[in-house]
Amino acid sequence: MDLDLLKSEIKTLIVKELNLEGRDPASIHDEAPLFGAAPAGAPASLGLDSLDALQLAMSIEERFGVRIPEGPEARRIFASVAALAGYVAEKKSDR
Amino acid sequence: MQDGERIWITGMGLVTALGVDVATSWTRLLRGERGLGRLDLFDTTGQRAVTVAGVPGWESVGPPGWAAKKWSRTSAFAWRAAREAIAEAGLDVGGGSSPRVGLVVGGTTGGMFETEALLAALHANPHGIEPLVDMISQPLSATGDRLVESLGAFCRVRSLCSACSSGANAFLVGALWLLSGSVDAVVVGGSDGLCRLTVSGFNALAATDPGMCRPFDVRRNGLNLGEGAGFAVLERASRVTERRGKPLAELAGWATGAEAHHITNPEPTGSAAARVIDRCLRRAGLGPRDVDYVNAHGTATPLNDAMEAAALRLSLGDETRRVPVSSSKGQVGHTLGAAGAIEAVFSALSIGHQAIPPTMGLEEPDPECPLVHVLREGRACRVRAALSNSFGFGGMDTVLLLTEPELGPPRATGGRRVVVTGVSSLTPHGLDDARTAAPLVDGTLAGAVPAPTGPIAIDLGAHLDTSRARRLDRTARLATVVAARALAEAGAGAIPIDVADAGVVLGTAFGSLDPSAAFMHRLFDKGPRFASPAEFPNLVPSSPVGHASIYLGLRGAALAVADLRTSAESAVVTAAELIEAGEQEVVVTGAVEEASELVERILFTRHTAVASSAPEERRRPRSEGAAALVLESEAHAAARGRTPLAVLADVRSWAGMPGERIPGPRDPGRAHVVLVHDSADAASRLAGTGWASVVRTTVTDGAGDQEGLGATALVAAVALVHRGDADEVLVLGTDEGRGYALTLVPPPRAVSSASP
């Protein structure tokens, strides 16, 4: 699967599912942290929280058929759009 | 002459997973038995966790034939527990004119379990009519109505929701009624039954433990849902003494406040919850050293328990090294709207029996929760005062203090005057305020505008910061817009309002029926794995209140109130009671109803199905609407240099009984009656009073029609007073035997300037 297309689809999903009204999906940086504060030098964080993480995990599974595990592993997968797209692509190709 | 009053508990009733009476529940609770098992009420295929605390033998808990009479399980539990409490108190409900007995019921799901079956039928056949007719019997206020039908003529009834603190807030409101003298005794409690919606929703939030929950344990991993009811009879001590009754415990303190933090997550430092615990103790005239036991909220979610331990450390300080703390949720589950009431009863029992229950499931206490835990089984303990904590979704915290009788000082009674300092109404007519709302009721628009239906054409995004409002659904947005505008108008004094002290109390008749239906349809289509975690918190009836509190930073009392077509009046009266009693200085109150095809279909079906519908009670199509009033204590408004728009001079309410007579106007020539809905019942309430001959108008068709229309009527009545049209306006709202009559008059200064 085309990784760039996947990233773009995930960005659209984030904006729609998390009601980021007025936000242009294309303006979300591939490497921007989704949760918490951004480390120095990194693109600004989307500032999402745990409730967003649950909604996002549910919609990723609904849209791509890829289940995001609960617990610490999810933190790594949800680090950024790039990380999330990488995980989804990897799991999809496993099948 | 008394210096104050005490509130005594004289009867208690319980329905829990451990037993369907107080004695069985308490005995098994002390023994450390756990009422947990596998959920078998409905198909649980695909559910993440199914360990729950269900009521055993629930089929036989209600009155004979309850299921055939379309009672909900929630109502059946409430009936059982309330009846036990009334019997223990030896209370005669509705036996003649005295005593005047009130009823306050807290809950979150009401008849959702039964509604789900109807939604499933609608899902299978979208054009079905039968499910709609049955759905009528299931709004949140239905439990109160069933208790009035079956237990006696309560003189006033209130149905409220503040998520998981609902049951505790029923105790609080009941106490206010006793202090104000509006009732002689009050039956208070909470009830909630398990349903697909809450099971799927808490599972979607990953807030559930698939096994048995472990409150305060280092391995705790979530809650187990439960169901049941807790009720108590509260009376003034003077009356109990007079009739030689016996107090079981004293309700010595209470406090409620919102965290204004997050719709599902608690404020992590515990400082918001600690503030409520502090206020509860202060108002009881007692301190941390007096507390002998804490019945914790203790849900066993990682966030709650850590927050609660932090809050207790902040409030009780070093006393946390002495005071035992336990959570009953490992035994009776988290019973949501019933939890605060069930646990208040447990706390009272700990005083009566001088014993405290354990925290079951706790094996290895989390170092983050350094408290004196009670492990494995209950134990004897000298308990003079017990705190009961309840923390709800949206950060709605309520804390009760139960004590042995006469431990602390008596409570001061209220009686403070309530004024209106800001109003805002959103109807199909538009956004109105104190300067523009009068035409909604003055007759000038009659017939000019056709009765509108459906959503109001308004760009809510223009009135809200959409990045902060992204979690607010339409109902919450409508409510927040009018609340913000009313607060802005009220704040136009020399000293602005400190919103952090303001409360918010809103009426909502049907809760979030459409979003709940959408949530359930998704469940039917895709299974529990795809239940939406983001939507679930918006399905509790108090969610608009929670969202408004968070968005606007309101940290006072936060409550939703339901009472069919008088839901707005019920909310405004509740807000006024909080101010009269000194619980709050400022409360923004009113009602919100979103356009709903489902509710419109239900009401249309009922209207055409009920043969007794009086022909003159024409039904307007249902529209959308929201309206808010800022109520404030007269002293608080004066202190900040704000001349009120109007004074709330008189409040009457009734529930089925003949009710109090509405005192007549001082000058019928300068008075005005506003009927929220034109009905034979409303007219009969005025007959024989001084109001019968007064100018009478109804809210104009152009304002649309919905269950919260009373708030729009009140806003318009304030405008009439403000414009100088009338010196006294009576707003009368009635529906199915219940009613509210609120009288507004100009502030004293305005009267003297108008008549030199």
Image (cartoon, coloured by chain):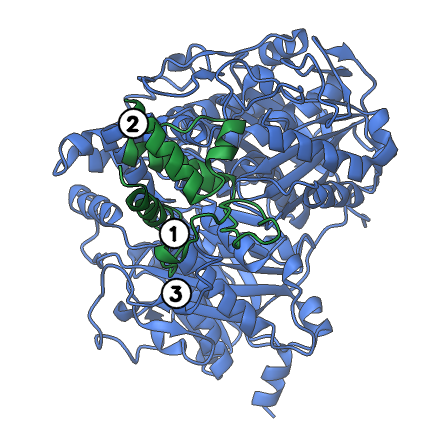
Observer-nearest of B431 and B678: B431
Q: Which residue is mark 3?
A: B461
Marks 1 and 3, how far apart at CA: 13 Å
Local crowd size for mark 2, using a 10 Å CA cut-off: few (<14), some (14–19), many (≥20): few
The green chain is: A
Q: Are marks 3 and 2 in contact (CB under 8 Å)?
A: no
**To which chain does the residue with label 2 belong?**
A
Q: Secondary structure at mark 1?
A: loop
Q: Position of residue B28 (x, y in %)?
A: 62, 8
Amino acid under disc 3 = Gly
Figure quadrant of the C terminus of chain B? bottom right
Q: Secondary structure at mark 3?
A: helix
Q: Which residue is mark 2?
A: A93
Q: Which residue is mark 1?
A: A19
Q: Quadrant of residue B223?
A: top right
The answer to whether residue B622 is seen in the rendering is yes
Residue B34 lies, with reference to residue B592, above or below; the image says above
Q: Secondary structure at mark 2?
A: helix
**Residue at 62% across, 47% down:** B259
State the hue of chain B.
Answer: blue
Residue A21 lies, with reference to residue B368, above or below; the image says below
**To which chain does the residue with label 1 belong?**
A
**Residue at 50% across, 28% down:** A73
User: Do the residues at discs 1 and 2 belong to one chain?
Assistant: yes
Amino acid under disc 1 = Asn
User: Do the residues at discs 3 and 2 belong to one chain?
Assistant: no
**Residue at 59% across, 49% down:** A37
